[in-house]
């Protein structure tokens, strides 16, 4: 009985069965509040448990104890709920194979298929169920699914990613289960398609007739008086392999003839489809033909014809209308829980100097709206649309309506053979027929085979910030800087992450909602992020638009109204961007979010900082910086080239270091929104503009000129060319003041370096033109020499500068020989004394320092100009002859200006002489150039004559030879 058993294999099967039972009980009894023991070494390198509930329970409620809680949390966090149970099910199947001693062919290929199916399933779970209720933070698909879903969304978008994930899952299941699953899927799929084409009742009648095997006429008479047969029973019968239908007839198959029957089934598959799609009579009943010769004489109805017939039979009252009324009813029960979650957000987050996030109760709720009246209105307009198309000779049917706050989108289905271009040219005619200002045609709707026609509603619905936050709070939880833009044409909230955009351009003429949108964006940040998470810089040329935010603790500098100072601040932002990149490079990370996840000890170890004072100078947390400019036109008029250069550099590089731009303008012209700026700002928001040209400048296509105003907008998603229409969020002055008053309770923490920023002569406005020597260089050397310690942190405390600037000052001192080379975590050695430094500043001591500056072309350079001075530690000897010449020149200049009335005459004489000299020099150059040109032409003519003479001689020689 047991002679053919394998002890080794049986022991593995028993152990695997115990593991399956242990994992199943652990997953079923998982509790997020269970205390999870620290994982052992190999697992701890790749896994750390998530703290979902704080504080954790005193003891584990899991049936399998602490190790069961650890195993369940590990599986849920890495594979998600679906992936964890799929793994357990696969282990159970493997255990069954071991116990039954079944042979498995191509185990490597099957293992590859199983891994592919696991990856596809977890990716689908993360795409359509991103969060788990009371589960780990990785979501329903776990870390594996989150990674797969992110890659699919990045490269294939939602629809393409879903198709690819389904394909990978199906291929993996086929590989790991051989073709058993394929056969079952083919049978169920064929019947599903048959149901979709013929209808459930007709398929049930045909199945019943074939199952009975009686006469066709008698069976049809009996079927007229009987109820429809359930499809599930018929499909279950087919799946069990009891009967196989070939050519529309039932054939009994014996067990020993299974392979032959399968072959006959595949061979007759085409005949079965032909007979099932032959013809339909007026009552809709399908009849089988007795002779195959009659098949060609019967007309076959296509799916398009059937859909057109069904759509024509529908009455307008049965048209599906989707609005936000049903969505609101579904969310009414959860409204209290959402408000409680928003109001308690500050309690869940760590405090920043006793800072609390504003409660959502500060915002005004939306007014009541009559959805029944709107539904009657859109149904009436649907009839008008169909009638208008019929007047132009087009058979177009409205199949679905989606209503939003301001716009209703009518999905129409075109007749066969109708070109899309004929429909898009009727926008103005449709607007006249519907008595609306404008109509926008979206052709085609992404993911559908219909055309969308956007028509304004007669009665507008106001979109409040509170309503958008309540409906979109689930999506904003994972965002770095969530902003609530408004609602789309379907009434869904528009919630985007500024950190992923990573910059936003807003354009629209006066009175269209641009400033209201800007206030909504700022308030979105105030409602969801603390000052230690997001800092802001505001530029307000109008002096009144952003003045209400002057008391915010998020500000790094008071609201800027001077455009010269604004340019300097943009230059500072560029410099700060470079400093952050240097810091990230030293730490060895690529993104600001990764840097903020590191502990201070990890940052110190990576930067090799050991001194306690140097550690204080190293930042361990960097907030995001959002720069808001209300009017770009004034900035570009003040210093267009410099401002454009700063904006381009920030837009190109600042995403990884957490610096983001929000730029608004009411003058969307090419001199304000230049090509370089537009190409580096992919996310753009356009309100109503004055002309088609302005719309092309902002969105690269027309459409913004046809908007309705008052918040009606078109949003261009970053990385795409598709526009999304929506209604912007409205925020009243009362709501803004309430939020600002709530958050403005503490003192403002302005950046000292920004407040002390100088803008004279543009010395600080353009970092590329700054001198190599910093303006605080001498003060920095005074501090270092006095303390006899070359430390960056010392300069930061003494001068109030940042880490990057202090490091540069130390580097300058090293080049000048004031401090020694880099000494690891220790402070640099100071090489000079206070007395020597005073002598160096006076220019009398050894090691005189001369600053290397940029060359500027002089109008009249001296004939014997001294060589350009360079930064050096050696004594630069100055010849006595040059000093004497300089003194004589100064004496002559003094005498010249001492004589009254003569100085002007002499200066004029000098100017006249210089002018005459320049004219003579130019005339001489022109004559010389003309003379050389004449000589060149003469030489060219002579060469051509010689070439012709040689050609004639060669021709004569050839004739003589002939």
Image (spheres, rainbow, N blue to C red):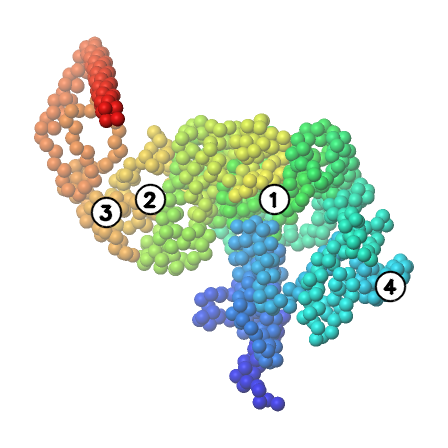
Q: Earlier in the sequence, mark 2 or mark 4?
A: 4
Q: Which element is circle 4 on?
A: loop
Q: With 540 as the anchor, is 867 left or right in this view?
A: left
Specify the label residue 215 is tagged with.
4
Q: CA distance from mark 2 to mark 4?
A: 96 Å
Residue 693 figure quarter: top right
Specify the label residue 494 is tagged with.
1
Q: Earlier in the sequence, mark 1 or mark 3?
A: 1
Above or below for 677 versus 493: above
Q: CA distance from mark 2 to mark 1?
A: 41 Å
User: Where, quadrant-wise, is the N terminus in this rendering?
Assistant: bottom right
Q: Residue furthest left?
A: 880
Position of residue 212 measured from the top left corner of the image (x, y, whole percent): 84, 66
Q: CA distance from mark 1 to mark 3?
A: 54 Å
Report if residue 507 is visible in the image: no
Q: Earlier in the sequence, mark 2 or mark 3?
A: 2
Q: Earlier in the sequence, mark 1 or mark 4?
A: 4
Q: With 486 as the anchor, is 860 left or right in this view?
A: left
Q: Nearer the viewer, mark 4 or mark 3?
A: 4
Q: Circle 3 is placed at which residue position? A: 814
Residue at 78 percent across and 47 percent down: it is 299
Q: Nearer the viewer, mark 2 or mark 1?
A: 1
Q: Residue furthest front?
A: 962
Q: Circle 2 is placed at which residue position? A: 805
Residue at 44 percent across and 51 percent down: it is 591
């Amino acid at each position: 009985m047991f002679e053919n058993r394998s002890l080794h294999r049986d022991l593995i099967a028993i152990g695997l069965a115990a593991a399956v039972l242990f994992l199943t009980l652990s997953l079923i009894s998982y509790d997020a509040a269970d205390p999870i023991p620290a994982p052992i070494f190999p697992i701890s390198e790749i896994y750390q448990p998530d703290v979902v509930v704080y504080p954790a329970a005193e003891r584990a409620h899991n049936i399998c104890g602490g190790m069961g809680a650890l195993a369940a949390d590990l599986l849920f966090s890495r594979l998600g709920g679906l992936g964890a149970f799929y793994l357990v099910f696969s282990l159970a199947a493997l255990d069954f194979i071991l116990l039954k001693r079944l042979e498995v062919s191509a185990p490597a290929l099957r293992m590859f298929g199983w891994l592919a199916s696991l990856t596809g399933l977890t990716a689908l779970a993360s795409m359509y169920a991103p969060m788990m209720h009371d589960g780990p933070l990785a979501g329903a698909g776990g870390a594996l699914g989150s990674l797969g879903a992110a890659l699919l969304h990045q490269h294939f978008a939602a629809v393409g990613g879903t198709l690819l994930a389904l394909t990978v899952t199906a291929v993996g299941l086929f590989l790991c289960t051989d073709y058993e699953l394929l056969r079952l899927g083919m049978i169920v799929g064929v019947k599903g398609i048959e149901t979709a084409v013929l209808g459930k009742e007709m398929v049930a009648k045909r199945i019943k007739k074939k199952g009975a095997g009686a006469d066709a006429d008698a069976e049809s008479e009996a079927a007229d008086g009987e109820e429809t047969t359930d499809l599930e029973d018929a499909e279950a019968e087919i799946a069990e392999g009891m009967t196989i239908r070939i050519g529309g007839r039932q054939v009994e198959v014996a067990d020993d003839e299974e392979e032959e029957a399968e072959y006959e089934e595949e061979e007759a598959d085409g005949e079965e489809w032909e007979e099932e799609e032959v013809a339909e009579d007026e009552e809709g009943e399908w009849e089988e033909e007795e002779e195959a010769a009659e098949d060609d004489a019967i007309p076959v109805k296509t799916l398009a014809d059937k859909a057109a017939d069904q759509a024509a039979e529908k009455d307008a009252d049965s048209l599906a209308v989707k609005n936000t009324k049903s969505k609101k009813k579904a969310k009414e029960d959860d409204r209290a829980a959402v408000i409680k979650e928003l109001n308690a957000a500050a309690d869940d987050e760590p405090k920043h100097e006793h800072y609390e996030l504003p409660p959502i109760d500060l915002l005004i709720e939306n007014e009541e709206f009559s959805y029944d009246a709107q539904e009657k209105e859109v149904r009436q307009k649907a009839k008008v649309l169909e009638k208008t198309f019929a007047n132009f000779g087009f058979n177009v049917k409205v199949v679905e309506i989606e209503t939003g706050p301001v716009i209703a989108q009518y999905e129409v289905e075109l007749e066969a053979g109708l070109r899309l271009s004929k429909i898009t040219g009727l926008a103005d005619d449709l607007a006249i027929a519907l008595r609306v200002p404008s109509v926008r045609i979206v052709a085609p709707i992404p993911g559908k085979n219909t055309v969308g026609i956007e028509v304004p509603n007669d009665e507008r619905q106001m979109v409040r910030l509170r309503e958008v936050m309540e409906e979109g709070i689930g999506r904003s939880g994972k965002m770095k800087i969530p902003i609530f833009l408004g609602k789309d044409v379907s009434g869904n909230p528009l919630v985007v992450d500024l950190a992923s955009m990573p910059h936003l351009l807003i354009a629209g003429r006066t009175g269209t909602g641009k400033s209201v949108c800007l206030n909504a964006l700022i308030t979105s940040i105030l409602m969801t992020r603390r000052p230690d998470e997001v800092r802001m810089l505001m530029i307000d040329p109008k002096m009144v638009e952003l003045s209400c935010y002057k008391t915010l603790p998020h500000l790094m500098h008071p609201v800027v109204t001077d455009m010269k100072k604004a340019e300097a601040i943009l230059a500072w932002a560029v410099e700060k961007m470079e400093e952050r990149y240097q810091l990230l490079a030293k730490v060895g990370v690529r993104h600001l979010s990764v840097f903020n996840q590191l502990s201070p000890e990890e940052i110190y170890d990576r930067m090799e900082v050991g001194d306690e004072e140097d550690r204080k100078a190293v930042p361990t947390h960097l907030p995001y910086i959002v720069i808001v400019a209300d009017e770009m036109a004034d900035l570009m008029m003040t210093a267009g080239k410099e401002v454009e250069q700063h904006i381009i550099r920030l837009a190109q590089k600042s995403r990884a270091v957490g610096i983001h731009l929000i730029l608004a303008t009411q003058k969307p012209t090419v001199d304000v929104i230049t090509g370089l700026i537009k190409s580096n700002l992919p996310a753009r928001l356009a309100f109503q503009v004055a002309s088609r040209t302005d719309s092309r400048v902002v969105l690269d296509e027309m459409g913004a000129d046809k908007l309705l105003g008052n918040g009606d907008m078109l949003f261009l998603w970053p990385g795409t060319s598709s526009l999304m229409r929506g209604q912007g969020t409205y925020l009243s002055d009362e709501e803004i003041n309430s939020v600002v008053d709530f958050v403005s309770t503490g003192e403002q923490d302005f950046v000292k370096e920004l407040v002390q920023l100088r803008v004279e002569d543009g010395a600080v406005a353009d970092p590329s033109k700054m001198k190599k020597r910093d303006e605080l260089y001498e003060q920095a050397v005074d501090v270092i020499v006095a303390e006899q310690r070359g430390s960056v942190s010392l300069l930061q405390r003494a001068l109030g500068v940042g880490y990057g600037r202090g490091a540069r000052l130390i580097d300058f001192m090293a080049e000048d020989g004031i401090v020694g080379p880099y000494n690891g975590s220790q402070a640099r050695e100071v090489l000079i004394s206070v007395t020597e430094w005073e002598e160096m500043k006076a220019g009398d001591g050894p090691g005189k320092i001369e600053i290397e500056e940029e060359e500027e072309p002089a109008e009249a350079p001296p004939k014997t100009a001294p060589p350009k001075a360079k930064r050096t530690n050696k004594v630069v000897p100055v010849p006595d002859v040059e000093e004497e010449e300089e003194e004589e020149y100064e004496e002559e200049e003094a005498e010249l200006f001492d004589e009254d009335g003569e100085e002007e005459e002499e200066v004029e004489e000098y100017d006249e002489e210089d002018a005459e000299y320049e004219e003579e020099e130019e005339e001489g150059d022109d004559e010389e150039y003309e003379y050389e040109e004449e000589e060149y032409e003469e030489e060219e003519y002579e060469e051509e004559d010689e070439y012709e003479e040689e050609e004639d001689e060669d021709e004569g020689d050839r004739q003589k030879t002939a």
